[in-house]
Image: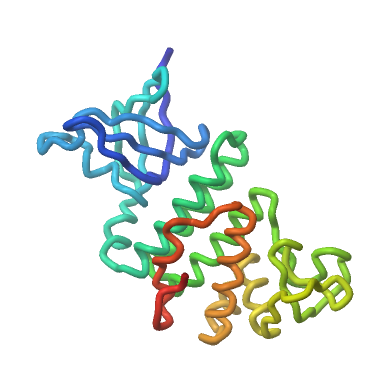
Amino acid sequence: MRSYRDEAVVLRTHDLAESDRIVTLLTRRHGQVRAVARGVRRTSSKFGARLEPFGVVDVQLFPGRSLDVVTQVETLAPYGRSIMADYALFTSAAAMVETAGRLTDDLENESGTQHYRLLSSALRALSERSHASSLVLDSYLLRALALAGWAPSFTECAQCATPGPHRAFSAPMGGAVCERCRPPGCAAPAAETFELLGALLAGQWSIADASGERNRREASGLVAVFVQWHLERQLRSLPYVDRAFGEATA
């Protein structure tokens, strides 16, 4: 078997034995890969610091039985350095990579490439502080779910496709719902919140950046419910996210 090379985002790492580390990568062409980096925890390691979460790397791997083996690493974008220096950025990035890990198991190469591009772009936006961390996170979550086949509807009824605007939101039904399809007890967000959600899904940052604090808070709550409904379990990192509007969101 020949070694292969790819670009990758480091999703997470786990210590192994005394000096090794297991690294989970989201690669551009090979989907999600788990590999062992031997000796990286030693002070003499040449590339131990390059395999930190949130960084984008050029990595060479040798196929193994259960884990591939990292043989060479070059840093392409050290996003982790600036992200880890800020709690709001760190918690948002942690929720992103956890979501990416859940969504990219056993993906086809084309879908994996799309997830790689989306995640690397979101991490870059966080590290450069291009937008509020809460907006970047919510936009990433919505777009990642859309790539996975769970695109929410905000402009028409998710059940009967009646054109909006609508005033009710149901995560089980897929987003906005009209009065006829509206189930009991569903959320009733403001019209501005629906506009913000649509902008985050479409990447319309001029609209998202101009949104108010109340609408951002309401949108974040709806996104969290939508994500956890479709993933069928809670993201462990999401309760710790500092949404940068005064308090952590559970």
Quarter residue 242 falls in: bottom left
Of 131 and 249, nearer the camera is 249
The residue drawn where x is 34% and y is 37% is 23
Q: Is residue 249 above or below residue 238?
A: below
154 lies above or below 165 = above
Q: Residue furthest left?
A: 43
User: Measured from the top left, where is residue 96 in percent x and y?
Assistant: 47, 56
Determine whether, in the image, residue 18 is placed left or right of residue 67: left
Residue at x 85% of width, y 78% of height:
179
Relative depth, front residue between 101 and 233:
233
Q: Image quadrant for the N terminus?
A: top left
Q: Is residue 28 above or below residue 204?
A: above
Residue 176 is drawn in which quadrant? bottom right
Q: Residue 211: x percent and y percent?
A: 56, 83
Residue beneath the point at 52% across and 57% down: 234
Tell me residue 113's x, y (percent).
56, 41
